[in-house]
Image (spheres, grey):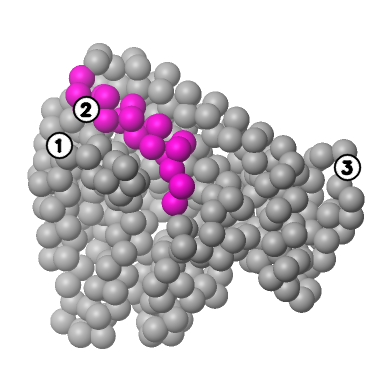
Amino acid sequence: MNRTATLSQLFASIQDDFALVDKTFQERATSSISLLNSASMHALASPGKRLRTAITLLSGKLNDYRLDKLVLLGVAYEMLHLATLIHDDIVDEAKTRRGNPTVNALWGDKIAILLGDYYFAKTAGLIADIEDPRVDHLFSDTVATVCEGTILEMMTAGSINLTVDTYYEKIKHKTACLIAACSKGGAIVSGASDRDIELLYDYGYYLGIAFQIIDDILDYTEDQSTIGKPVGNDLRQGMVTLPLIFALQEPSQNGYHQQVQDLLAGGTQKDEDIQKVVNWVVQGNGIKRAFMDAHAYGNKAREALYHFPPSPDRDVLDELIDFVLERKQ
């Protein structure tokens, strides 16, 4: 069974609600400017796995399922996520995402920046319509934290001496905080207790860390046909991630330390040189150790989730942990 089918089955109970989120997104994102609409429709054409929307809705299902409010929150988080991806592609000078041309590749950086800004602006109205100051603060804090994570990523790019602690600080800011905001926001909107709100925040936070570690592993273990970007893409962009950090800690490096340093310094990046480093990381213990960390955080997410009584919706959130840990794209 392929991964898309597995995820589709996993989210079967909220498929109709997904459709409502999509409809609301298009309604809220529509502009009178045709160029902006064209760029927006292109960005929406590759929606990804929809994990953030699913986590928002499913977290709400553990309490009082207020679909009207949860849809607004889900759309706001999708807009925020899409805006950050569009801006990331500009920073990274990326020409493709998930195998398709980026907005900046088709319309240029200026339109891409403005589309991301447009989405950010639209989220303000969505959050205001929820009418809960706790969500206001959560959303604004999340946007600020994601921006800090992006800056941390830029500051640490090209650093061969990146530590495990700094790596985690970066991914907690850039990835984990947004997924945690989805689960926490879903809990707030559904009238959960303070304890349940914090437990669902922990669930999303630890799941987000595991998600990013797996993402960084796939950059070394999968090819463009499955992940939509060239193998070793992070290395090409000067990004040192957990598998490489662990590989560089191995006692015998046989000249790879210098080879990595040369690649990160921005010298000539031949495909064969990138592939040699990728093969070295895969053949060593870096991937295995990174997987162990990902599973440890997955277990932390499960521990937080298991404070809730058994239910079909808790089961889906539980299975989502397994999906994140086992995914290949």
Q: Which residue is mark 1?
A: 13
Q: Residues within 10 Å of mark 2 (few under 14, many from 20)?
A: some
Amino acid type assigned to the residue bearing label 1 in the image? Ser
Query: Could you tell whether 116 is left or right of 92 in the image?
Result: left
Task: Please tell me the numbered disc located at residue 102.
Answer: none
Disc 2, disc 3: CB below 8 Å? no
Name the residue at 80% across, 40% down: 249
Query: Could you tell whether 218 is left or right of 136 in the image?
Result: right
User: Residue 284: percent from the left, percent from the top?
Assistant: 74, 41
Amino acid type assigned to the residue bearing label 2 in the image? Asp
In the rendered structure, which disc, 2 or 1, sits on the residue that comes first in sequence?
1
Inspect this view and state whether residue 327 appears.
yes
Disc 2, disc 1: CB below 8 Å? yes
Q: Quadrant of residue 222?
A: bottom right
User: Residue 97: percent from the left, percent from the top?
Assistant: 44, 67
Q: Which residue is mark 2?
A: 313
Work out whether 41 lies above or below 213.
Answer: below
Work out whether 234 lies above or below 113.
Answer: above
Q: Which residue is mark 3?
A: 252
Q: Quadrant of residue 131?
A: top left
Q: State which region is magenta.
A: 311-329
Amino acid type assigned to the residue bearing label 3 in the image? Ser
* Structural distance between the alpha carbons of marks 2 and 1: 9 Å
* Structural distance between the alpha carbons of marks 2 and 3: 48 Å
